[in-house]
Every structure is written in C-alpha cells, then in structure tokens.
Amino acid sequence: MNDILAQVATKTESNKNAGNAILYECVKIIMSIEDSSGIRVLAINILGRFLSNRDNNVRYVALNMLMKAISVDDQAVQSHRATILECVKDSDASIRKRALELVYLLVNGTNVKPLTKELIDYLHVSDQDFKGDLTEKICSIVEK
C-alpha cells in the first residue's frame, strides 16, 4: 500500500483543485497509517507545498494537517518552519492565526530564540487587530 500511496503522491499534479483534493486524501491516509515513517515525510512535504498555494483554503487545510502531524513527526514539520512563519504574515486573518498556533507548537529549546525574534520583528509591522494574539503567543513562548 505504501508504494501505491507514494506513486499517487508523486505523480498527481497539484495545479488544479482535483489534484489538490487527491493529494489531500492521500496525505490523510498516509498520516493515519501508524508504521509509515518514510512515506510520512513525503506527505508532510506535500503539505509544505500546499502552504505556497495561492488558494487560502488549501493553505488553511495544510496548516491544520501540519498541526496534527507535528505530534507524529516533529522534524519533518520543522523543515517547513520558514514557510509557516511566512503564513503568520498572511493577509488572511484565519491563516495568520492558525500559522501562529503552529509556530507555537514548533518552538523547542533549539529554535526558541530565532522564532521569538521573528515574531517580535513582525509585531512592529503587524495589523493592529493581530497584535494582541501575537503578543499573547510571544509571552506564552517566553514562559514555555
């Protein structure tokens, strides 16, 4: 089954909604299989590509799936940290909030300083509506 899932994941084009839907279902199946660590990285990389999509719905779904994936494979999700941080600066409020929650989950002893610095730097230029959420998460990260 892993071979078939890998083929679907690598050969499906993601430039149309139908392809994205197939890839999303493939990722869901991969993430539900307990013993599939090698193919799980492929699934998380697909989600990372979804974060660069212009469609807000695709990015939001990817952020949700990555929040679930972090408990299964933290390192694979960490590799998309820069793209996730860019989502914190997104113009869509729901994407910003979901990305901020994911950044909070990504914080660990080795990346706490650079992530906090990025968030503090963004605090200076962020929308007034978002400053409260951002400040709250920065304080939680420092406390953590």
Image: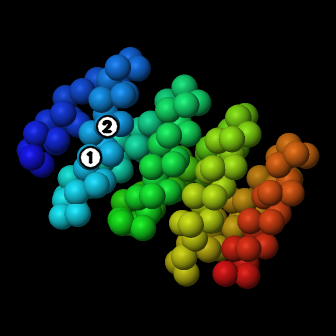
Tell me which residue sits at (58%, 30%) in the image.
56
Count of picture labels = 2
Identified at 74% across, 65% down, the residue is 137
Residue carrying label 2: 25
Which three-letter amino acid code belongs to the residue tagged 1?
A: Ile
> Percent x, y for residue 103?
60, 60
Q: Quadrant of residue 33?
A: bottom left
Where is residue 78? Give x, y as percent: 45, 61
Query: Callout 2: 10 Å neighbours few (<14), some, many (20+)?
Result: few
Is residue 87 left or right of 33 when viewed as pictured?
Answer: right
Instruction: Give the quarter of the figure containing the C terminus.
Output: bottom right
Residue denoted by label 1: 29
- Looking at the rendered structure, the kind of residue marked 2 is Glu
Q: What percent of the width, then of the height, locates residue 131?
A: 85, 53
In this picture, residue 94 sits left or right of residue 27? right
Q: Quadrant of residue 90?
A: top right
- Residue 6 versus residue 111 in the image, above or below: above
Query: Is residue 41 visible in this depiction of the protein?
Result: no
Alpha-carbon neighbours of circle 1 within 10 Å: few (<14), some, or many (≥20)?
few
Image-based side of 113 in relation to 60, left or right:
right
* Left-right relation of 115 to 78: right
Q: Is residue 27 above or below residue 53?
A: below
Task: Inspect this view and state whether residue 137 appears.
Answer: yes
Q: Identify the residue shown where x is 17% and y is 41%.
A: 5
Q: Are marks 1 and 2 in contact (CB under 8 Å)?
A: yes
Q: Secondary structure at mark 1?
A: helix
Question: For the point 63% across and 58% down, which residue is it?
Answer: 101
The percent position of residue 99, horizontal first and vertical second, equals 61, 50
Task: Tell me where residue 46 sits by quadrant.
Answer: top left
**Mark-to-mark CA distance, 1 and 2:** 6 Å
Q: Secondary structure at mark 2?
A: helix
What colour scheme was applied to this rendering of the protein? rainbow
